[in-house]
Amino acid sequence: MHTQRKTALWVAVMVTCLLTACGSLLESGKPARQVYLLQTPTAPTHAPAENPAPTLVVAVTAVPGMDSDLVQALGNDAQLSPVANAHWPDNLPEVFASIARHYLSDSGKFTSVRQGTIARPDQWLLEIEITAFHGTMGAGSSITGVVLELQGMLNCNKENHDLSIKQQAGTSGDSLSALVAAHQQVLDAALRDLPDQVIQVCAENGRS
């Protein structure tokens, strides 16, 4: 009988612990996580290139602070703050790399486009570093716009060439959906001319 009471007590303690743990994980005061999807811009429709550029290998990184899945805003005091409970589907470099690869491929200007960090001598390598992709704060800590800055290095024909892209957009309101829409706007603008920009830089230095 004594053993049965000890067993019953042990079971009761374990049940209590489990219920307590579950309660902390499902705390009703915690807001639900919200994930926002950035879309691949629609590439302009062109006839297939008769002589497409070589295969383009794309590598994307981000400076510290940008390498996360957080939607963020930068204040006038240089403080980078996460927007409450707003996330991208993955860390920013992975999200941007996927979108850039699809857009560059859809442009039809390259033999193929793939993600990676190493290119063969007959391929081109585009390395992009995201230095800014965040909301910008105005007076009273309100978010008034979004900025996107990219620093790139394009290797083609055995030479390296620097690329720099900066886009800004204002927000159409103070809602989270307006903030995400502004992020999409600067992303679209940054990618719009990227295929032609890559080809022009490499063409000026002769294709291999």
Image (cartoon, rainbow, N blue to C red):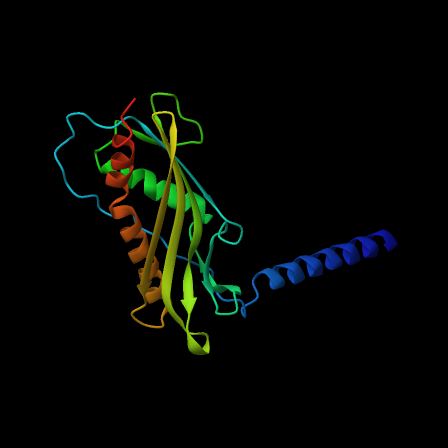
> Seen in the image, is 83 located left or right of residue 2?
left
Q: Position of residue 124 (x, y in %)?
A: 34, 29
Relative to 27, is 162 above or below?
above
Relative to 181, is 123 above or below?
above
The structure residue drawn at horizontal position 31% and vertical position 61%, both measured from the top left corner, is 181
Q: Quadrant of the C terminus?
A: top left
The structure residue drawn at horizontal position 39% and vertical position 48%, both measured from the top left corner, is 150
In the current view of this chain or complex, which residue is farthest to the bottom? 140
In the current view of this chain or complex, which residue is farthest to the front? 205
Number of numbered labels in the structure image? 0
In the current view of this chain or complex, which residue is farthest to the right? 2
Q: Position of residue 202 (x, y in %)?
A: 29, 32
Quarter of the image where one finds residue 58? top left
The structure residue drawn at horizontal position 52% and vertical position 54%, both measured from the top left corner, is 65
In the current view of this chain or complex, which residue is farthest to the left? 47
> Seen in the image, is 17 located left or right of residue 132?
right
Q: Position of residue 49 (x, y in %)?
A: 16, 29
The structure residue drawn at horizontal position 40% and vertical position 26%, both measured from the top left corner, is 119
Q: Position of residue 46 (x, y in %)?
A: 13, 37
> Seen in the image, is 47 located left or right of residue 1?
left
> Seen in the image, is 45 located left or right of residue 101?
left
Q: 157 or 181, which is in the foreground?
A: 157
Q: 123 or 175, which is in the foreground?
A: 123
Q: Quadrant of the N terminus?
A: bottom right
